[in-house]
Image (spheres, rainbow, N blue to C red):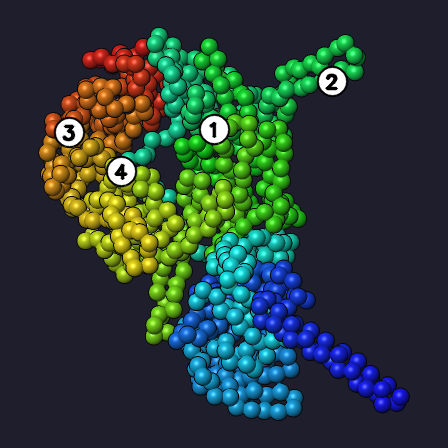
Amino acid sequence: MKNKIVLNIILVYFIVVSIVLVMQLYSGTKSSETPVAETVRLADKLNSSVVIYKDSPVMLINKRQTIIGGKNLNVVPVKFNGCYYAPLSFFETAYGAAVEDDFDKKQATLRMNNTAVVFTTAQAQVISSSEESIINLANPVIYRNTYAYIPLNAFCDIFAKEAFEYNDSMLIISPAEENVVFDPSAEAELLADIEQQVNNLPLVLSENNLKTLIGARAGIFGTGSDTGAMQVSAAKSEKMVIANSQSEKLAVLGDTVYAVCAGRLVAGNSMDAALQPSELPEGFTPDNINVYNNRLYITGTGENAKMPVIEQTFSSEPDSSDTQRQANITVPGKKFFLLCCDIDENMQPVVKRWFYCDGEAVDKQLFENSLCIAVKKSAVEPTGDGEYTTPSYCDLNRSTAAKLDEIKYMPQMLDKNYTAIYRFDLADTGKKVDADFFLGVGEDFVLTQNSVIFAAQGSLPSENGTTTNKLTNLYKLNLINGAYYHEYIDGTLTSLNRLNEYGGYAALAEKNGKSLLYTLNADLKTDSKLSLSAAALAGAVYSGGSIYLTDASKNQLIIASLSQVYEEDETDEEPRTVIQAQEKATMALDGVEYIKPFESALIGLGKNKASNNAEISMWSIKESAVKTAGDIIGDSGTSITPVETKNIAEGEMLFDLSLFVAEENISTEKYNGIYIYNISENSTPVFKGRITHNPDGSTGITITDAAYLNGKYFALSNNIFTVNADNADMTELNRYTA
């Protein structure tokens, strides 16, 4: 009996042990197939991890973005001979370590978790409370740019960390006991999202970051460190290339020309030459106008402006209907406004929608189906308390205030201003505006179709570790879907131009006295790099498939042609289209200060160096730049400034028209006005007539804008708007004086 009991006990024990072994075996098999133990949820995998990306100053600490070196963006992890390295500031920021760096002695000390590690070039001395040891480093410490770079494999061995590498560029460092394992094939989306956050992605703002970035003082915030001014927007240089320089003081809609004149909107009917001021909301002052889909978009400022709204009264009576009536509300304070207007039969704008925000408009671009406006607002209100407020705006009669976590910044943005970029969908005027907010953008940004590109100076460590290579970082952020692109180019950026028909960009940079022309695709990747024959070029303008570049002294013009070519690569499934640049011609300007491309020729304005007379000239650029014609406008006392003409449609007239302002100071006559020339590719510019806003030969008023419509010229100066006939005398038909 006892033997049976013992046998049954042994049998039960064997069965239990077998079940446990099977479960352990199953568990072990499951663990090898599952990237993470079931106790570690996917969302928790980074709770105790640090993520870095080579050459990026951004890292993740416990899923939160931060900067490795604070305001110093040159402090980045590097990868050398297959090993990742990080500067000492990384350990201080990521793990709270105490660090000391003696660059002269080539010695670096790191203290954390009751352990001190003294790194020399090839060894690490590890000192803890219980023992001391010397470790020979498989990868030596690197010393460059006054920083010691520590091999991260040695750090992980000493402090019990595990490292996971992704895409040969990203490293995830986790405590060994956390058992955090990644499977690239199963978790591609998660890893790609992590990579996006550390590969120079714009960070989300917080109160502490705001104080750090704009510089905290007692009671009030100050400015951050200087980043150096760079000229990024196309053709900002004064007196350079005049293509695309038309202002937005005039707009043509149907048979009417609208003009912003001395803070009023004036309508000019081209059929009967009538001019009349237009009615706008009280307290609103227009500044610029655009036309899209038979609507006027008017921007300006308003101070306690009275804006139209629809008031609706709801009736409680069963047989009574609700009523609506037009009303006005007062928007307190001074704001930036955008008005969307229809036009009635009397040429008067009727406000259908209005938008306002705090701040000052600094850029505005009208694209195929959208209008983007960049507005700058101080992060610190001018009060005694020095409080900061986030940007606010009102659209479709709904007020919105941005939250700090809606504001993004790049580490290089060290300005005390917010830049808010508002995007209006012109195809759907009932859609609420899209808004993006950035801190410290400064002047170095360009609005493109549904995107914004930032530029910032930086540097990369040189190979010998003693100097840095100057570069310009370019960052592109899609305002619609948040897609992000990054590229850097050698040297200091001079100008950046959109290449609309190519879907890319042209960037001019200066490095070591040489001028470089880059072509970039829509994803901001470099297609080509061209070293130009002329140095110290001041800027570039794109027009008609060519880039025109001038030096600061205006002695010569470089013409580079652009083309799309197919380029095959072993890694590409099919040939890709790239934008190629090729230097085409060099032109001695001979006193020309303004250039306007015209088909396969150039129109030049300036002083003829031989005669010192003011001159309009033509230059052929079919094979090389050769002066083909010229016409004297005035003597040595004449100053010339170009004015572009709106509404010159192709095929509308036998010759294209260009209007130019000239200030003459001739012994026999003084004149200030528009000179009108008929221009064709194969003939001398033919003088046709001139228009002035100065009575009795005075010269104090300068015409700045012009338009041509139905055989009439519309000319605008600061407070005068005129309509003139297209005849030999340019007869003035009507005048509006503010």
Q: Amino acid at mark 3?
A: Glu
Residue 664 visible in rendering: yes
Picture layout, residue 513 above or below residue 133: above
* Type of amino acid under label 2: Phe
Disc 1 on helix, strand or loop? loop
Q: Where is mark 4, residue-wise?
A: 543
Looking at marks 1 and 3 on the same chain, the residue that comes earlier in the sequence is marked by 1
* Residue in view at x 29 percent, y 29 percent: 643
Q: Say whether disc 1 or disc 4 marks the residue closer to the N-terminus.
A: 1
Give the image location of residue 627, x and y in percent: 11, 37
Mark-to-mark CA distance, 3 and 4: 16 Å
Q: Is residue 397 above or below residue 44?
A: above
- The front one of 301 and 738 is 301
Residue 126 percent across, percent down from the top left: 56, 87
Mark 3–mark 2 CB contact (< 8 Å): no
Give the residue furthest to the right.
1
In the picture of the structure, the residue carrying the numbered disc 2 is 314
Please report the residue visible at 14 percent of the width from the left and 36 percent of the height from the top.
619
The alpha-carbon separation of the residues under discs 4 and 2 comes to 57 Å
Relative to 712, is 178 on the left or the right? Answer: right
* Quadrant in which residue 276 is drawn: top left
Mark sitting earlier along the chain (4/2): 2
Does the residue at mark 4 contact the one at mark 2 (Cβ under 8 Å)? Answer: no
